[in-house]
Amino acid sequence: MKIKTYLTALLILVSFNFYAQSKMLTGPKHLIRLEIPKNWVQAENDQIPFLIRPDEKNSSDDTYMYVYGLDYQSPPDLNLWIEGNSSELKNDIPEIKIGELNYSFENLKKDNFLTGRYKVVSYIYPNFKEEALLVIESKTTIITAVLAAKDHAEFNKYLNSFKELVNSIKINAAKVTFE
C-alpha cells in the first residue's frame, strides 16, 4: 500500500512539473525555482543560462524574458547595483529613458535569505525597445528578472507574463559546488 501511495505521489509530482514547466537555476550561493509562463518556451542562449521567448510565430527576436543570479563575496546593495547598471547604460546610450515601475510581489518578502528589498527599473531605448528589470536583493546574491520587448505595445502585451514569472519565483540560499 505504501509503495502505491509513493508511486501515485511521484506520478502527480512528475505530471505537475511537466505541465507547469518548472525550472531550477543554481549558482554557488543561490537556488532559484520558477515556472515558465503559459505560451512561453525556453530558448538556447550562450550568454544567459535561462532565457524564454513567446511561443508565437509573430513575436520579435527582441522580445524575451530571463532570470539570472549574481553571487557576491559580501552582501550586495540593491541601490548601488541599480545605480551602477543604470550609469553604465546611460554612458553607453545617453538617450535612454530610465524610470521605476511600482509593482508588489508577495513572494519576495524578507526571509532567511531575501532582504525583502527589490525594485523594478524601466528602460526605454531610442529605438523604442522597452525593458523592465526587476532587481532582488538577498544576503549574498542579486537576482534579476527581465522582460525585454521590441516596443511599448509588445511590452504591454507580455507584461502579465512577466508578473506571472516573477510571482512564481522562489529563492533560497545554497552551497552549490561545480565539479
Image: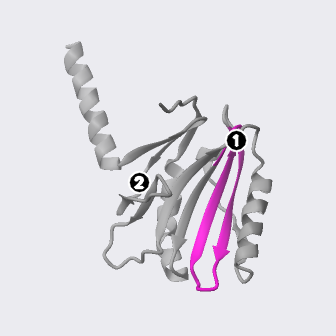
Give the x, y percent position of residue 67. 53, 54
Query: What's the magenta region?
Result: 114-142
| Relative to 15, residue 174 above or below | above
Magenta residue check for 41: no
Question: Residue at horizontal 26%, vertical 21%?
Answer: 6
Q: Amino acid at mark 1?
A: Tyr
Q: Amino acid at mark 2?
A: Ile
What label does residue 55 carry, if any?
Answer: none
Colour logic: one colour
Instruction: Please tell me whether the stretch drawn in magenta is mainly helix, strand or loop.
Output: strand
The quarter holding residue 56 reads bottom left
What residue would you read off at disc 2? 36
- State the SS at label 1: loop
Give the x, y percent position of residue 43. 38, 60
Of residues 138 and 159, the one drawn nearer to the viewer in this rendering: 138
Alpha carbons under labels 2 and 1: distance apart: 26 Å
The outermost residue toward the front is 179
| Relative to 68, residue 54 above or below | below
Question: Residue at horizontal 48%, vertical 78%?
Answer: 154
- State the SS at label 2: loop
Give the x, y percent position of residue 134. 63, 58
Q: How many marks?
A: 2
Residues at discs 2 and 1 in contact (Cβ within 8 Å):
no
Question: Residue at horizontal 76%, vertical 39%?
Answer: 75
Of residues 179 and 41, the one drawn nearer to the viewer in this rendering: 179
Label 2 vs 1, first from the N-terminus: 2
What residue would you read off at disc 1? 72
The quarter holding residue 57 reads bottom left
| Relative to 66, residue 4 above or below | above
